[in-house]
Image (tube, rainbow, N blue to C red):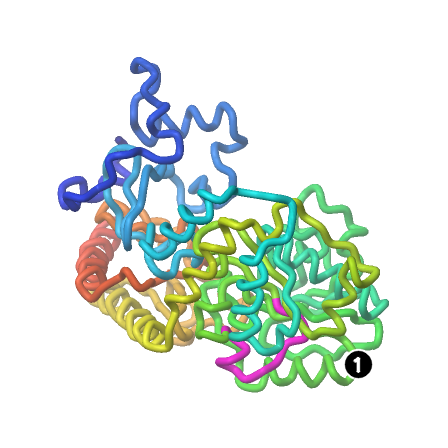
Amino acid sequence: MTDQHTGDQTDQPDDQPDDQPDGIEQLDDAGVTPMTNEALFARSCEVIPGGVNSSIRAFKAVGGTPYLVAHAEGPFVWDVEGTRYIDLVQSYGAIILGHAHPAVTAAIAQAARSGTSYGAPTPGEMLLAEAIRDRVPSCERVRLMNSGTEATSTAVRLARGYTGRDRLVIFHGNFHGATDALLAAGGSGVATLGLPGTAGVPASAVANTMVVPYNVVPELDEQVAAVFVEPVAANMGVVPPAPGFLEGLRAECDRVGALLVFDEVITGFRLTRGGAQAKYDVRADLTTFGKVIGGGLPIGAVGGRREIMETLSPLGKVFHAGTLAGNPLATAAGRAALGELTGDVYMELLARARQLSANLRDACAAAGLPAQFPVVGTLVGMYFGDALGNAAPTNFEQAKTTDEQLYAAFFHAMLREGVALAPGAYEALFVGLAHTDDVLDQIGEAATRAAAAVMRDRT
């Protein structure tokens, strides 16, 4: 085991599951591979590019070798070495009730006994679509799919097909998944036609994508099909919308006949029962979902006004299909998760997010480590360094002044204390129903020791 993730190997519950999911039972290969994170990650690199199936998991932004999760329960994950971590990643927001929540696992097991995929309609997908519509009234019709990326790519095609226009507007620092047309990088605070943000995306794919500063309402013209926005920018340290920003987007889209698309893959059913649209009282034309609506299983969705959504095939001219769309296991898990999220639960999550932020803030302040942990509803962000003084970022130009090296040091110090943060300085921290007051206190105590260690190492 490396010195970068010692964690807590002693304080483990007596009721840990005896089975070892996700192939762990198949690793008994006569000692060929030691059961360590380092050895198994090296083995993964021999068959998986970079050893991971989602780039940030490789720890490239923070350095070191990632831990490999063997199992999880409540607020905890255990790695293959048996080390327990308090988990603030929570599958990047998909896990809101806690890992292996009984209502969700029971729903999955019951659904699996009836089959795992049919390539045919099911009542379950209808019920999940109804649950989404009930919570987000702008979603008069809902189409389920397999991921947040598929949802945003479908929304792009749908917006263009419905309006007959090509141009898209996105905001610098917002992230909308791995959709070519939305993987564009913009200039420093200047509205500009996008350039490809990654190799493999041709210039033609983003030639009609305009990148503009977040929290500034752009002037649109009649060439714009849609404006895509994270109503809360949860991929640059959690930046809230400025007063009037979302309302201004709504008015500007209405002025030129463009569609307003809210990317609520993160905020949907986590921020509030009705997502960002309920919190800020701004109605989107189209909304993309993921994360919470799958209860931890892969899923995505697009919802919106009836006349727009019925432009999708088989009713309309915009094609969409997917063999696994509306998968019965994912829809069962999603319905179970949404069913647990009552108003009282959201009130509790709001309080826990504020407590997590306060614990981390106080721990860093006591050590003299410059850090901010802004709170927007149930989301907690991070910003390290003193480039902005006491001000919180309001756009990506400000957010990217965060001290990534300082965050990397704090990340590994917390990992050594048994607390897992996201391995990237621009991610959110996700507190869930399983993060009890006692667990939050443990995080605060760990942060106190971690921050002190970081500051000692800096001197």
Lateral position of residue 452 relative to residue 386, left or right? left
Stretch in magenta:
275-287
10 Å neighbourhood of mark 1: few (<14), some, or many (≥20)?
Answer: some
Point out residue 79 in the picture as x, y percentages from the top left corner. Answer: 30, 38
Q: Is residue 375 magenta?
A: no
**Quadrant placement of the N terminus:** top left
Point out residue 381 in the picture as x, y percentages from the top left corner. Answer: 40, 65
Element type where label 1 sits in the image: helix
Query: How many marks on residues?
Result: 1
User: At 49% across and 44% down in the image, what residue appears?
Assistant: 114
**Is residue 91 visible to the viewer in this orientation of the structure?**
yes
Point out residue 409 in the picture as x, y percentages from the top left corner. Answer: 32, 49
- Residue on which the image places disc 1: 256
**Is residue 413 visible to the viewer in this orientation of the structure?**
no
Relative to 65, say whether 355 is above or below.
below
Lateral position of residue 359 relative to residue 191, left or right? left
User: At 23% across and 69% down in the image, what residue appears?
Assistant: 362
Kind of residue at badge 1: Val
